[in-house]
């Protein structure tokens, strides 16, 4: 049987429609530099990029000039956190609040700002992996400048209540940044309704190309941030560099498709998750990390007490899965997210992340669950457990 890909939280394959649209662009005369608008070639590229900006903006209920193209969500996170904090910090507003469950591309720039003299408060997530609203509200103060939380957790699928968090931040005159890399195109996000000031976007998590993303910057509440790169005036002088026309068009195409398929995708991922878990009922020693109504169905994190994830993954050789975030999977340190959730080390060591996608069939989910169940039972027998 052909290998089955169940690592969609890491990256997704390009949608056929996205490939087709990018291929057309690469074969016509839109190869010009979009900043060189003195001739037709540059103008064509510029117009394509601006149409894509409008498409991405409308997807989140933003204005086109509130979208800044970046190389991906990691750069967008850095630009949002470093750029806003360095530009807006005052003597009275010098605290950043985030959580231990965030992606490293949020935690690391926050720690850099701590070195620069700002105060950093990292909250622990609840047992489900999400932010407790009451605990968060107690943590904010008059000195809080910025709050940064992700929408969907990339390791366990927990969903933060960004609408409630946003309303608290807006009421308290605090800037709110959302890392939506894992959530965009999977759950609806309205930046106005959720009172979001900055939001990081990605393309390759929803069947678009790698190497492209964007940062939403609310022109009313934020307006301006400090660039973290120098050397050009592109993107309102906030992000210099020649724009990647083909990738940008691919990102807009992926967002357009996601808008049409979001509800159907969610139903399909829910069905895949149900098939997988139903087939694992009765499997001893397992624990589902984040398994509430506030969990995105496409991400399934399962721990097994006493086993090692590497052994399980090796034993399921025809299934492509991961131990956790692909950004840190080559690091032997235990998952910082699972540790923050309070999981016992035995379960952390044995945690495997399955993530389903648009191309996953119910037969794939069934086969993978059988392989997983057989692997866990086999490895338990080898260690003398039945």
Image: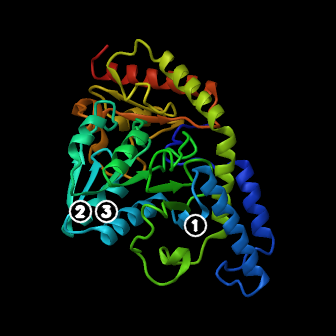
Q: Nearer the viewer, residue 168 or 266?
A: 168
Q: Nearer the viewer, residue 338 or 194?
A: 194
Query: Marks 3 and 2, Cα distance to the nearest angstrom?
Result: 17 Å
Report x, y in % for residue 272. 57, 26
- Report if residue 80 is visible in the image: yes
Classify mark 1: residues with Cα within 10 Å, few (<14), some (14-19) or many (20+): some
Which residue is denoted by mark 2 in the rendering?
Answer: 93
Looking at the image, is 367 positioned above or below residue 28? above
Which residue is denoted by mark 3 in the rendering?
Answer: 109
Which residue is denoted by mark 1 in the rendering?
Answer: 65
Looking at the image, is 220 positioned above or below residue 2? below
Q: Nearer the viewer, residue 114 or 237?
A: 237
Report x, y in % for residue 77. 41, 60
Q: Earlier in the sequence, mark 1 or mark 2?
A: 1
The residue shown at (58%, 78%) is: 242
Q: Secondary structure at mark 3?
A: helix
The residue shown at (45%, 18%) is: 280
The residue shown at (67%, 62%) is: 52
């Amino acid at each position: 049987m052909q290998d089955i890909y169940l690592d969609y939280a890491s990256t997704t394959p390009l949608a056929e429609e996205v490939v087709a649209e990018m291929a057309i662009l690469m074969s016509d005369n839109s190869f010009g530099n979009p900043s060189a608008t003195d001739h037709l070639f540059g103008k064509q590229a510029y117009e394509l990029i601006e149409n894509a900006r409008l498409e991405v903006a409308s997807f989140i209920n933003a204005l086109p000039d509130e979208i800044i193209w970046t190389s991906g969500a990691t750069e967008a996170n850095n630009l949002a956190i470093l750029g806003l904090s360095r530009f807006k910090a005052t003597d009275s507003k010098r605290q950043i609040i985030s959580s231990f469950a965030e992606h490293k591309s949020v935690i690391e720039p926050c720690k850099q700002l701590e070195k620069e003299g700002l105060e950093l408060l990292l909250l622990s997530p609840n047992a489900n992996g999400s932010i407790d609203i009451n605990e968060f509200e107690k943590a904010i103060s008059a000195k809080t400048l910025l709050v940064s939380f992700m929408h969907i957790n990339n390791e366990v699928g927990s969903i933060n209540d960004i609408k409630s968090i946003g309303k608290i931040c807006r009421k308290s005159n605090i800037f709110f940044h959302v890392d939506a890399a894992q959530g965009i195109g999977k759950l609806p996000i309205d930046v106005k309704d959720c009172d979001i000031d900055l939001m990081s976007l990605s393309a390759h998590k929803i069947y678009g190309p790698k190497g492209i993303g964007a940062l939403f910057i609310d022109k009313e509440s934020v307006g301006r941030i400090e660039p973290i790169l120098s050397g050009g005036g592109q993107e309102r002088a906030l992000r210099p560099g020649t724009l990647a026309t083909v990738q940008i068009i691919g990102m807009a195409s992926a967002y357009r498709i996601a808008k049409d398929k979001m509800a159907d995708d969610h139903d399909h991922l829910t069905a895949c998750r149900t098939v997988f878990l139903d087939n694992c009922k009765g499997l001893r020693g397992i624990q589902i990390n984040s398994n509430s109504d506030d969990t995105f169905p496409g991400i399934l994190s399962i721990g097994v007490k006493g086993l090692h994830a590497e052994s399980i993954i090796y034993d399921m050789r025809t299934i492509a899965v991961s131990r956790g975030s692909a950004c840190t999977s080559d690091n032997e340190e235990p998952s910082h997210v699972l540790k923050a959730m309070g999981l016992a080390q035995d379960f952390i060591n044995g945690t495997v992340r399955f993530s389903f996608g648009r191309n996953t069939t119910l037969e794939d989910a069934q086969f993978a669950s059988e392989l997983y169940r057989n692997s866990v039972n086999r490895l338990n027998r080898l260690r003398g457990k039945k």
